[in-house]
Image: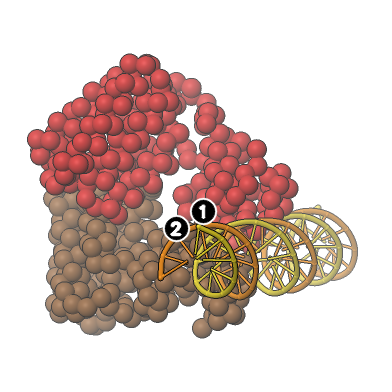
Chain colours: A brown, B red, C yellow, D orange
Amino acid sequence: MSGRTADTLRESLEQMILSGEFEDGERLDETRLSARLGVSRTPLRESFQMLAATGLVELIPRRGAFVRQPDVVQMFEMFEVMAELEAMCGRLAARLCSEEDLRRMHDAADDCDRALELGDADVYYRANEVFHNALYQASGNSFLAGEASRLHKRLQPFRRMQLRVRGRLKQSMDEHRDILMAIEAADEDRAAQALRSHIAIQGKKFNDLMASYSKGPAKLAS
Amino acid sequence: MSGRTADTLRESLEQMILSGEFEDGERLDETRLSARLGVSRTPLRESFQMLAATGLVELIPRRGAFVRQPDVVQMFEMFEVMAELEAMCGRLAARLCSEEDLRRMHDAADDCDRALELGDADVYYRANEVFHNALYQASGNSFLAGEASRLHKRLQPFRRMQLRVRGRLKQSMDEHRDILMAIEAADEDRAAQALRSHIAIQGKKFNDLMASYSKGPAKLAS
DNA sequence: AATGAGTGTCTTGTATACAATCTGTTTGAC
DNA sequence: GTCAAACAGATTGTATACAAGACACTCATT
């Protein structure tokens, strides 16, 4: 279970947090965790810094590292920001994306199609990520692409849950086509709006899911 | 010069990087830097992680920490994203901000006014930061507020330069008033547009400044 | 002469030991 | 009986020592 390298260590902890192994607000005891993971405190502390950067833990000086399980409200807030970032990407892409960019998005969308036919959620999920990253790149603003990618990654586990909702895959696929058409038509407003609602729907679906479980932050399978 | 605590260490390095003490792409030698700052490598490495989170340095495993001086292009990209985030804050604030939020923004704007009368750029600069943070809070989306605040902080030194342009302070002040009026009138689109151009102008002014210097990344005074 | 393997040095990555600070408890005084 | 201060234990922060990988230089071989 314990990772060998530093980056693996961060990923291990990320998985542990996202899989709900720790309570919200729980303090991560350096000594105990390092013993458990079979590493010393030094690399563990460095991985804490990385996790703090993504917001999964909060570091309070002289107090320790505390896991920050995002609650439903914060989750919704994150989807709201994501929607706006993606809309911005769409707007810029519609204005100035290259043939190469378009091709890459089309390829990724086709991969999504194939995954849908196979009914394989995991494959779809990966192809979906490629599609969105291609979109971010197509915006031509590499800083925006980086920020969007970062937030996308952070929302990954929740996005994944929402994709399990019945019929959502097909719907998501159709939205991709709409987005591509708008970008190809260089219709900035339509592209932005299509993406905004594409993401907003995800937030909403996720919210519905949470409401249906109706108790605490659900354990998310890795 | 050397900071005593870990957070101070990060700030010291931040200042050193932003003041142009290092070349773009330069590797930060852990041993030499730790000797120079009078600390051991352990806290230095942790501060590297923090700086990597803000994008000021890039950490390449087994290779080291490399400073990433944002060039003019990336700077412009960052202002473009900032404009959109602030526009989003404005839209949300116009929709749902409280009397308390409004009052805080008004107070900060008044402080800006006073600083303008005094002709004190530093005081204006701080009051301006309070104003914008109040706006972020007023959006009601605390995640958005955090992200906006983070990017704002990262753009601080460049924003500061741009404020030194003749007559820019007064103009900026007027823009604040427009923004407040739009929010008070609950006019979402106008608030968003006012903020978008408020930030876009900053990016443009900064760009002009760079062009007028026309050589390399200028040394930024702290 | 050029290329490739091997070795040596330098730098990053990790472990451990030590110092400083915080928390909780106990004891004493009012 | 309650509040405060001091002490004990534990935990974070820092320094140093050690391990392992990367890069450059040399030397041998083609």
Residue sitting at 38 percent across and 47 percent down? B150
Q: Quadrant of residue B112?
A: top left
Question: Quick one: B44 or B209, which is closer to the camera?
Answer: B44
User: What residue did someone put label 2 on?
Assistant: A53
The front one of A91 and D28 is A91
What subunit carries mark 1? Answer: B
Residue A36: x and y in percent read 55, 81
Q: Is residue A62 left or right of residue A115?
A: right
Q: Tell me residue D12's x, y (percent).
A: 56, 63
**Residue under the point 71% across and 47% down:** B38
Q: Amino acid at mark 2?
A: Ala
Q: Separation of disc 2 and disc 1 at Cα?
A: 7 Å
The x, y position of residue A129, in whole percent, is 32, 66
A138 or B182, which is in the foreground?
B182
Say which element carries label 1. helix
Amino acid of disc 1: Met
- Which residue does the numbered mark 1 point to in the structure image? B50
Label 2–label 1 contact, CB within 8 A: yes
SS at mark 2 in the image: helix
Circle 2 residues within 10 Å: few <14, some 14–19, many ≥20: some
Q: Chain of mark 2?
A: A
- Relative to A112, say whether B181 is above or below: above
Q: Quadrant of residue B16?
A: top right
